[in-house]
């Protein structure tokens, strides 16, 4: 078959691709991280590129106006190569840089608290003999759908040597687990997804060891927590039974394997351990969080919420527990939102509107100049806009309020949080009506999952004595604002608590303690799995939850 040379600019990367292959395929082969929330199915319209030279048939989509089409704009996932071509990839069509957050933490106060919290467990000795007089290290890993977060841990003291996070490079193959599973069914798709996950993990690990002065051979143990799909992809296992509801073929218990076999850049003999899962969509990440917050040992009726890309929820106490998951998407993690970003320096994490002109007061992570909105900031902003009548119950911006910060962006009504250079902002920050609809769908998914689970066990939300919020969203969320828009149940604020990254915290426990490894295995057998994908009430609850705070507000 005839080959054509495709050159991408501004990267300058080139590749030969068979005639009929897509520009999206060519970009992935070169490691160019084009956005594709739909996994290359031609529906999201994010992989917009411009043909600068050569020829390519039109790729009709609502995001491409006739004028833009005449100027050469195409969807990369639908643009079949028929000649040599030069392709421009706009910045807005690229994923954010893979490295999003890096810090040496050398026993911070948080780590001192963790050491004190761990004092009640027995730290397992290193599983391999030392090869030098260097301190043995372990790797605790939260393998998320959107982000990968890792810690380098001193095994003899439990102290954190360094911590880092990066966007999961699999994002180029779809934003959620369903789109990843679909992509894995393509020829070579599973191998590519596994390779992208390993690239992300190994790059983060290399940065950790380089920054801390460690060597890869010093890492003699690893513990991984992730949802069921992410672990299947990491291990190169076919994830299709997850989507096809073939629960008997879905692996939720994983063997300990050597790092060399896992293709991780640690000591090749280092054992790699995995948090067990519960079901197709409730994985080891949420189980690790449940282990960390000890809800399985408490008499209090507890609601555990990990609102990541795959929202996972567990309800119960030491006598019984039920778990479920809902597809929330990555909106609150910053992806697919015009001015969205992860929780990193400069991200707006808190918003308050007090002035009559609608200018909000902002708080950013580390106090850096504002450069985007993270999840907690988006929740605050929606609540404040609703409180001041700028946003109605349908999630529509109300132009009749006469707010001077309501303008139009990308052809849609938008609220301008900061103009470029206003308050030190490097660029304009805003939410438009498309962003708001995505965020409301995410909110609705979480709210509907909680309501469906409560109905299944015939419990009213007022009976919940403790709500534990995990994940990066839970690091700075304002509970009163989350209640106001309907993400969290309407309960007294003293019932809410935040554990940050529960998945990573649980991975630490598994890494450090043989006792905790046995405990999490037993815990996996105790939680009843509720599959919302086939539950008749879930969709009704979801539709009712697409309003602020809910169609029937007093219910939550």
Image (tube, rainbow, N blue to C red):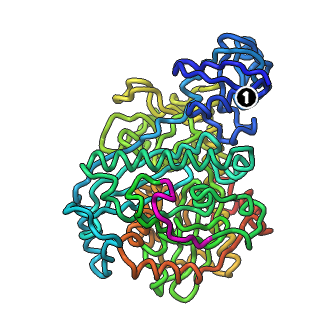
Of all residues shown, which one is farthest toward the front? 131
Q: Is residue 293 left or right of residue 398?
A: left
Residue 312, magenta (yes or no) = no
Residue 256, magenta (yes or no) = yes
Pinpoint residue 154: horizontal percent, then vertical percent. 27, 64
Q: How many marks?
A: 1
- Residue 498 visible in the picture: no
Residue 196: quarter of image: top right
Q: Quadrant of the N terminus?
A: top right
Pinpoint residue 153: horizontal percent, then vertical percent. 31, 62
Residue placed most toward the observer, 45 or 147: 147
Residue 102: quarter of image: top left
Q: Is residue 548 above or below residue 359?
A: below
Pinpoint residue 363: horizontal percent, then vertical percent. 36, 43
Residue placed most toward the observer, 210 or 94: 210
- Badge 1 marks a residue whose secondary structure is loop
- Residue 288 visible in the picture: yes
Residue tagged by mark 1?
22
Residue in the image at 27% along x and 52% along y: 214
Q: Is residue 463 above or below residue 326?
A: below
Residue in the image at 37% along x and 46% along y: 206
Residue placed most toward the observer, 56 or 312: 56
Residue in the image at 58% along x and 59% along y: 235
Q: Quadrant of the C terminus?
A: bottom right
The span picked out in magenta is: 252-263
**Residue count near mark 1 (Cα–Cα under 10 Å), binned few <14, some 14–19, many ≥20:** some
Q: Is residue 39 above or below residue 1?
A: below
Residue placed most toward the observer, 525 or 137: 137
Of all residues shown, which one is farthest toward the left? 133
Residue in the image at 49% along x and 78% along y: 520
């Amino acid at each position: 078959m005839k080959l054509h040379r495709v050159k991408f600019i501004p990267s300058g990367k080139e590749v030969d691709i068979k005639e009929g292959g897509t520009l999206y395929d060519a970009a992935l082969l070169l490691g160019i991280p084009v956005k594709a929330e739909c996994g290359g199915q031609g529906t999201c319209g994010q992989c917009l590129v411009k043909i600068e030279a050569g020829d390519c048939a039109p790729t009709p989509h609502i995001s491409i106006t006739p004028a833009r089409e005449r100027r050469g704009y195409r969807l990369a996932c639908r643009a079949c190569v028929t000649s040599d071509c030069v392709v421009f990839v706009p910045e807005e069509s690229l994923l954010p840089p893979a490295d999003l957050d890096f810090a040496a933490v050398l026993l911070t106060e948080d780590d001192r608290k963790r050491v004190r919290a761990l004092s009640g467990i027995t730290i397992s000795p290193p599983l391999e003999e030392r090869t030098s007089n260097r301190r043995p290290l372990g790797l605790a890993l939260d393998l998320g759908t959107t982000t990968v977060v890792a810690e380098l841990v001193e095994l003899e003291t439990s102290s954190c040597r360094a911590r880092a996070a990066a966007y999961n490079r699999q994002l180029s193959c779809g934003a959620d687990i369903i789109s990843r599973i679909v992509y894995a069914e393509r020829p070579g798709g599973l191998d590519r997804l596994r390779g992208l996950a390993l690239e992300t993990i190994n790059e983060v690990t290399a940065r950790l060891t380089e920054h801390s002065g460690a060597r890869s051979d010093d890492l003699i143990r690893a513990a991984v927590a992730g949802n069921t799909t992410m672990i299947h992809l990491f291990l190169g296992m076919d994830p299709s039974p997850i989507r096809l509801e073939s629960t008997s073929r879905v692996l939720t218990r994983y063997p300990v394997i050597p790092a060399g076999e896992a293709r991780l850049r640690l000591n090749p003999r280092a054992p790699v351990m995995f948090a067990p899962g519960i079901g197709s969509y409730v994985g080891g990440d949420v189980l690790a969080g449940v282990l960390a917050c000890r809800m399985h040992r408490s008499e209090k009726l507890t609601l555990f919420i990990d609102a990541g890309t795959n929202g996972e929820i567990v309800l119960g106490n030491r006598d019984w527990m039920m778990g479920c998951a809902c597809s929330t998407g990555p909106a609150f993690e910053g992806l697919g939102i015009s001015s969205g970003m992860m929780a990193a320096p400069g991200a707006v994490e808190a918003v308050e509107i007090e002035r009559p002109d609608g200018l909000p007061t902002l708080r950013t992570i580390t106090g850096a100049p504002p450069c985007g909105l993270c999840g907690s900031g988006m929740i605050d902003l929606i609540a404040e806009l609703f409180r001041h009548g700028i946003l109605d119950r349908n999630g529509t911006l109300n132009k009749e309020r006469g707010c001077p910060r309501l303008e139009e962006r990308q052809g849609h009504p938008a609220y301008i949080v900061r103009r470029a250079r206003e308050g030190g902002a490097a660029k304009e920050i805003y939410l438009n009506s498309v962003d708001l609809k995505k965020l409301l769908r995410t909110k609705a998914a979480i709210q509907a999952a909680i309501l469906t689970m409560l109905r299944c066990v015939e419990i009213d939300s007022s009976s919940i004595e403790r709500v534990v919020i995990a994940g990066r969203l839970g690091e700075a969320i304002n509970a009163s604002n989350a209640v106001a828009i309907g993400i969290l149940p309407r309960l007294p604020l003293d019932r809410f608590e935040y554990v940050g990254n529960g998945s990573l915290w649980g991975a630490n426990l598994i890494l450090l303690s043989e006792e905790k490894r046995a405990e999490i295995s037993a815990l996996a057998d105790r939680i009843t799995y509720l599959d919302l994908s086939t539950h008749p009430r879930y969709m009704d609850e979801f539709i009712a939850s697409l309003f602020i705070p809910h169609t029937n507000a007093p219910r939550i």
